[in-house]
Amino acid sequence: MEKGEAKVRIEKLKDKINTLNYKYFVLDEGEVEESVRDSLKRQLIELESEYPEFITPESPTQRVGSVLSGKFAKIRHLSPKKSLMDVFSEEEIKDWYERIQKISPQKMEFVCELKIDGLNITIRYENGMLKKALTRGNGIEGEDVTHAIKTIESIPLRLNEGIDLEVSGEVYMPRKSFEELNKNQKKNGEPEFANPRNAAAGSVRQLDPQITAERNLEMFFYHVDKSSLKDVKSQEELLKTFKRLGLKVCEEYKKVGSIEEVVEFCKIWHKKREKLPFEIDGIVIKVNSFDQQNLLGFTAKAPRYAVAYKFPAQKVSSRILDVIFQVGRTGAITPVAIMTPTLVAGSTISRATLHNEDEMEKKDIRIGDTVIIRKAGDVIPEVVEVLKDLRTGKEKKIKFPKTCPACGGALLREEGQAAYRCTNKECYAVKREHFIHFVSRKGFNIEGLGDKVIDQLLENGLVDDPSDIFLLEKDELMGLDLFKDKRTENTLNSIEKAKTISIDHFIFALGIRYLGEQSSYDLAQFLLANKKKSTIKTERKKQEKSQQALFEESIGETEEDFSIMDLIETIKSFSQEEIKNIDGVGEKMGEMIYEWFNNQKNEKYMEKLYRNGVVLNKGTMSISGKLSGKSFLLTGTLSDMSRDEATELIKMNGGKTHASVTKDLNFLIVGENPGSKLDKAKKLGIHIITGEEFKKMLK
């Protein structure tokens, strides 16, 4: 074929295949057999192979890119991504409606959409061409998964119009594809996926896009950055516009005119959900009019104009075969029921938590009982009820242990607490769980150090506390089972990479009781806003000529540095009361934080982490914005926003929040009925602004 003829043929093939894809994936119209579509694509591949100069990014053959070599890049969303508030009953749906009616009393229409159980993805189109695909991430920035998303054929590489657009939707795995995937996993001796949602998420995060392409994923679109389509006036109109542009939508949506019709729609799909070719876990209810949506606005965490109704958790019966007692990282003893494997909400369950001794006695749970189990929120398995009519008399009462099941140490139940805890500070099980928590994804995220490897490290005396992980050498790992050259090299590289960690992940990894992911983030934000330079670090450099100290001397320090020693110095400068008042902390957590960081043993542990090369950075907390580098504190009541909403705006725009008035505070935002903070701010010369002045700073 002549070059000019080939160019024309390639363009016609691309247009035809894109049209067929649009009709097949978006309109559900099969104009030709799938084999015909595949043969056209093969022709295009052959021609592009012969004339690579005619390959363009929007060609249907360019869906599979090259294998990525490492972690996904993080990219800031053009607009913040908010989660929806969940409701779980008809009463809660109606309560939501009453709340929004007080803000917008005029008549409302609603659009009810199926809540797809998949992975939220945002896609950017520029001049109609797919440019970037991001996961939701933390709502501010997400992971770049463009290479994988381009393999999903229901996602157009080119829109039907050459416009700029940022759209969001759900990537999911159809039931049929999920069954085929698990069949192949089993055949190849690989672990099966628990449910389609996990399978879809794992497929999107593959470094090799060819693997993603083989998983047969699909995507429904349902949201747009409204500045992208200013002429669209409602959610119903948006979904129709998506179809016109070539974006696939879930057709099972419905516009209704009353909250009673909303409830009826939810009831219908609760019954019909199993007949769908994909899994759903609820219904998303949105006010249809965009003008009304704008009027209703947002709370600090979610839009007011929409909620996600979650279906009641599926319940099934199972039988308790045994009960074991697990020891957690804080020493808490948790009874766990071992049951006959049972399929619940799409995954097989063989264990369920019994929570604590009081819960077991309250429900009168016994070994041998037939029980009703459910997955609360379609995720966590729990025993709901005992079917006592099915007892035979052979059931055994469960005896809660008097000593730690792992080490035999004494157990203590603190006043006001439901859990018993092991008091042995050297308990192996507690130590093991602490290591597992330390290396977890939300902690130091060290790949290659699974539970079995942790066991071997402890049993062989290679580590005493988690800081020793950073001193492991090749010969030590090679001496463990299953460690060959390549695995050893990968693990050591992961350990080295993990030495640089964001402050919030570092705090989480310490395993302080009551501190979860969000509270660790809140504490990290506070410490960054009030950071102090450590004199201990300077003295240590003078006294010790370790490799780490010499390295730090060689690279020097900048004003932005915030080391572990600085963290210690900063948090110890605050009283217990001040720590309790940190946003997101509170009474119990504040007390635990204060005690933990003022414990000499814990301080030595953190110093050891510092000496072993752990370096802190700001991670996502270093996001720039209009308020970057500025710190704020609120006092009194603002007329048009809550304290939480104002705090969220500060964080979203790169600012920091303070819990108290200090000389380092930049702005005190004053509302009605301000407290003593105003007087203190005046004495320190802090800049005082009103709520209106604060809003002007954001424009």
Image (cartoon, rainbow, N blue to C red):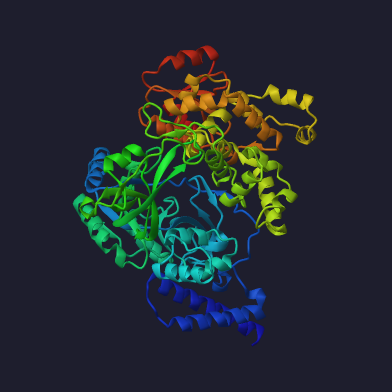
Location of residue 615 (image quadrant): top right
* x and y percentages locating residue 118 in the rendered image: 42, 58
* x and y percentages locating residue 319 in the rendered image: 32, 55
As rendered, which of 615 and 62 lies closer to the eye?
615
The N terminus appears in which quarter of the rendering?
A: bottom right
Location of residue 176 (image quadrant): bottom left
User: Count of labels shown?
Assistant: 0
- Residue ID at (74%, 25%): 540
As rendered, which of 367 and 538 lies closer to the eye?
367
- Residue ID at (26%, 60%): 269
Is residue 106 found left or right of 13 in the rendered image? left
Location of residue 669 (image quadrant): top left
| Residue 377 in view, yes or no | yes
Is residue 420 found left or right of 481 in the rendered image? left
Q: Residue furthest bottom?
A: 1
Q: Is residue 356 above or below residue 366?
A: above
* x and y percentages locating residue 637 in the rendered image: 37, 24
As rendered, which of 458 and 303 lies closer to the eye?
458
- Residue ID at (52%, 24%): 594
As rendered, which of 387 and 443 lies closer to the eye?
387
| Residue 312 in view, yes or no | no
Q: Is residue 409 above or below residue 199?
A: above
* x and y percentages locating residue 93 in the rendered image: 25, 46
- Residue ID at (36%, 41%): 399
Q: Residue furthest front?
A: 394
